[in-house]
Image (cartoon, rainbow, N blue to C red):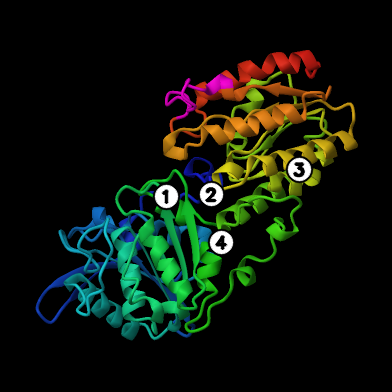
Amino acid sequence: MKFLPILFFALLAFIVCAPVRADEYEARTFAGTDGAQLGYRLLKPKDFDATKKYPMVLVLHGAGERGTDNAAQLKYGAPLFLKPDVRDKYPCFVVVPQCPPEQTWSAVKGWTGPNAYSEEPTAPMKLLLGALDVVLKEFPAIDQERLYVTGLSMGGYGTWDLVTRQPQRWAAAAPICGGGDVSRIAPAKGVAIWAFHGVLDPTVPVVRSQEMIAALEAAGGKPLYSEYPYVKHDSWNIAYGEPELLPWMFAQKRGSVVGWDQVAGPFSQPPSNLCPGAGPMQSGLWFRTLWKGRREQWSRMKTIEENAVVFFGDSITQGWGSLAKDFPDLKVANRGISGDTTRGLRARLQGDVLDLHPKAVSILIGTNDLDQGGEPEVVAENLKAIVSVLHAANPAMPIVINKVMPRGAKAGFFPEKIQKLNALYQDAFKNDAKVRFCDTWALFDDGNGSCKKEEFPDMLHPNAAGYTKWTTALKPIFDELGLAK
C-alpha cells in the first residue's frame, strides 16, 4: 500500500463527476482553415470584470467522451470548476474542447506502449490550439502568465503533448493516467507538473506516468507525482478530488515553479527523518493531506472520545466504517490512517491515542511496512516500542494485537514475510500479561497464504463480510478483558 486506495480516499475527495448543466459552459465552435470544426465549451469567471486579470484552465477529456455533441466532454474535470467554493475562491476561464470521434489529442499509436512525439500536431490538436488562440485574443483579461492544462487518459496524453510542444506557454499541468515521449519532455522541466496514475490501470499502464516523471527529474525538473494503489483507469475521480490540487495549480506562474510546501503549508506529519524508529514511512502527497486532515479532525474530538477503546492502524482500520455499530457495548475511537506504517504510528501515538486516555488499544499494523520493503525484524522493533510507550503511560491498560492479515497476489503477495512478522510479534509479547492476540492471519488465510476474494474483494481490504468475521473474533477477547461500557 504505497499510496492511498480509492476506497478510503473517498473520505477526502470532492464529488467531481456530478452531471453538469450544459448551459453553465457556453457552447462554441472553432472552424479551421480547411473547414474542419471543433466544438468546445467556455466558462467565464464568476462576476467577470474585463478590467481584471484571470487565469485560464484547459481541460482535455478522455477517449470515452469523444463526439460531436459538444457536451460529453463536460463529464469529468469540468464539474470541479462549477463548485460554488471553487468559483468564489478561484475565478478563472475554463476551456473544455471535444475531440471528434475516432481521433486523438496526441499522436499516440496505442495506449499501452511508449509514445513517440510527432512534430505535426494531430488534426484535433491543431483545432484546439486555434480555438485557444481565439479565446486568448477575445479575452485580454486572461493572464497568459497563468495558463494551466489538465487532462485524463487520452487527455492525459494530450496534456503531456502540449507541455512538450509548448513548454514556454504553460505555467502548470496536471496529466492524469497519460503518457508521452520521454525523449522530448526535458524542455518542460520549468513547467509546474503534478501527475496522477492508478497502479492497476489496465488501459494505460502506470509505467507511462512513471517514465515521464523520471525523465523530468533527470532533466532537473521537480514534478509532483501521486500514484494510487489498487486503482484502475478511473484515477481522475481521485485526482480531481485532491484538496491541494487547485491551491497548487493557481499558485503557479509561467517560468517560476512554486514549491509544494509554499502552497500546502506545514503538515502535522513530521518528516520521515524526524520520526522515531527505522523502516519505511509514506511520503506521497496524498498521505500528507490525509494525515493532516484526519489528525486535525481527531484533535477536535478528544473530549468526546476520551476513555474509548482505540483502534489504531492503517487503511484496514480506517475503512472500518461500521466500527461503532459492530461494538455497541464499547465506546470506540477509530485512529486508522490509510497507508500508515509502524513508524507513522510511533510518530502519532501521543496525540492520536494517549491523549484520549484509552480504556484499551487494538492495533493492526505492518502490511504497509512489508509492502514497502521493510524488514520484519525492524517492523517488530517498532511495534515493541509502541507497546512499551503504552505500558509506560498506563501499566494496567490492555492491548490487543491483531496479526497482519494475508493479502492476495493482486495486492502484492509475500505470505512468508507476513508469517515471519507475525511470529516475531507473538514471540515479543508471549510473556506480556497485558497483551492479547487476535489471530487475524489464521482467521482469513485461505490455506495458501492468501485472503479470500469473497471477504477481500481487492485482495487487501475486508468487505462487510470480512469486518463481521473480525468483529466476531474480537468480541470474546474484549469480553474477557471486561471492556464493556
Image coords of residue 29 (percent x, y): 21, 71
Determine the image quadrant of residue 359.
Answer: top right
Q: Is residue 145 above or below residue 92?
A: below
Q: Is residue 181 above or below residue 306?
A: below
Disc 1 target residue: 199
Q: Nearer the viewer, residue 399 or 259?
A: 399
Disc 3 target residue: 352
Residue type (three-letter) at the residue carrying disc 4: Glu
User: Is residue 188 rendered to the left or right of residue 468?
Assistant: left
Image coords of residue 398 (percent x, y): 81, 25
Q: CA distance from mark 1 to mark 3?
A: 30 Å
Residue type (three-letter) at the residue carrying disc 3: Asp
Which residue is at 85% across, 27% downward? 397
Q: Do tag 1 and tag 2 residues touch (Cβ < 8 Å)?
A: yes
Disc 4 target residue: 244
* Label 4: how many Cα within 10 Å (few below 14, some 14–19, many 20+): some
Which residue is at 19% across, 72% downward? 122
Residue type (three-letter) at the residue carrying disc 1: Val
Closer to the chain start, of discs 2 and 4, is 2
Closer to the chain start, of discs 3 and 4, is 4
Tag 3's secondary structure? helix
Q: What is the magenta range?
A: 442-456
Which residue is at 77% across, 24% downward? 430
Which quadrant would the C terminus be assigned to in this image? top right
Closer to the chain start, of discs 1 and 2, is 2
Q: CA distance from mark 3 to mark 4?
A: 24 Å
Residue type (three-letter) at the residue carrying disc 2: Lys
Q: CA distance from mark 2 to mark 4?
A: 19 Å
Q: CA distance from mark 1 to mark 4?
A: 21 Å
Q: Nearer the viewer, mark 3 or mark 2?
A: 2
Disc 2 target residue: 2
